[in-house]
Amino acid sequence: MAPVIHNRLRRGGRTVLAAAGATVVLGLAGCSIDLSDLRPGGGGEPSPEPAEPVAAAPLVEQALTDLAEYQGLVVTGQVAESVGADVRDASLTVADGGAANGTIRSGSIEADLISADGRIFIRALEDFWLDQGVFAPDFDEFGGNWVRASAAQAGIDPSAVLAPPVLAEALGGIELESDEAVEENLDGTLTHRIDLAGERNQMWIDAESGQIKRIAIEELVVPEAESGPQVRLDLAEADTAAVEALYDGVVATTTDELGSSRDARIEVGWDGQAEMTCEDGPDCTWSGTVRDAAGTGTGTVAVRMDVTFSNSEIGEQTCDDSGNLEAGGTLDLSCSADYNIVSQTQQTYTIDGNATLSTRGLPGGQQESMLEALNEQREATLSGGGEPADEESEEDEGGN
């Protein structure tokens, strides 16, 4: 059951927002323009009667009511995390419960995207991550594999912003700039253009179906959020077959591939020098602190440290430790390995140590909880009662 939308369709009274817009300039070089019809007795066809003004508020109210009841939404166009941020071309299908899949494009590089249960995952070639300025200790595992990403890296969090009921409520919270809708031919379709408060914030509603065909919003702020992405998107209702295919794909990917995913949301690095100590045994311990090296990360990332102690005579011993690194924070890791041969040999050995860091995109029981949430959302969506997922999953605070 879709939530009630509280539309605030009043004029003015809102901070002006600068939306992305394009001006089309028609060059007429080398052409002559026949103005004979403007002379007395020119005899041209009479100009068509101007269209009667149409009240904007009822059109918007009905269109938003319809949008909130969609099982799923297909969006194509451009998104950016904020004004001035990198722009992504996006083609996504989003269910009313928040599950999403599709593609995004950064420049000439296309990437697959899925989003569900407050998480975003991207599968792309290494060049995509290099373009994002991502530096990770396990970067060699990123190319061609699923990697957990932030909304900034994706350009948008579709689960949090584009689920039909959420999008309808966000659009309903933008006031009308004009009480009248303007008839406009949009890509061959007769629409009513609605001017919203803010600079070039607009919505186009199909004159025949009454459904929203396009939105251009400088900052699409959903309830409870302080900011939002810049979007210019064409919208279409997703039919039941498309929604079923969406859930089939996201569930299959979560089951088969996300267990080995990595995490790009925080740049994980050593904070200073790690320390290695050895006692009789040889019994060696490796200790170190990792941190958000860039200081611009988001969320909480599961980090694993794998240590190998080695000596050419007595071989190798390994150990590991794991923990959760919060954005902007630090994490202490330590582990030990004991060869336990000193009593047999009474010799002294030189032990070398090496440690590697890696991330986990879906650690611990998060894979199971994500699948459970997806199955619940799927059942609710296809039975007509989908509810949008929370922006951040309760399981997102940690786990190994």
Image: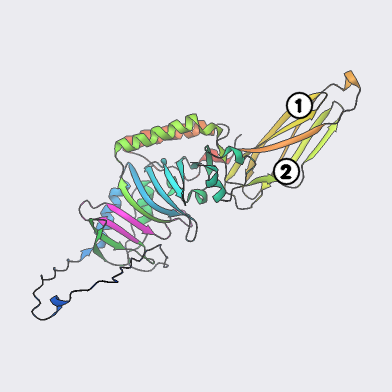
| Residue found at the very far bottom of the displayed protein | 40
User: Looking at this rendering, what residue extends furthest in the top direction?
Assistant: 344
Quadrant containing the N terminus is top left
- Main SS, magenta region, reads loop
Report the residue marked by disc 2.
289
* Residue 206 part of the magenta-drawn span: yes
Residue drawn at the location 33% of the way across and 65% of the way down? 24
Quarter where residue 116 is shown: top left
- Please say if 197 is above or below 267: below
Quadrant of the rendered image containing residue 396: top right
**Relative horizontal placement of residue 179, taking residue 378 as reference (left or right):** left
Residue 317's mark?
1
Residue 169, compared with residue 248, is above or below; it is: below
Instruction: Choose between 3 and 30: the one closer to the eye.
Output: 30
Residue for point 53% across, 41% down: 148
Residue 201 on image: x %, y %: 36, 62
Magenta residues span: 202-229
The outermost residue toward the right is 346
At label 1, which amino acid type do we have? Gln
- What's the residue at 76%, 26% (across, down)? 317
Image marks 1 and 2: residues in contact by CB distance under 8 Å: no
Residue 306: percent from left, percent from top: 69, 33
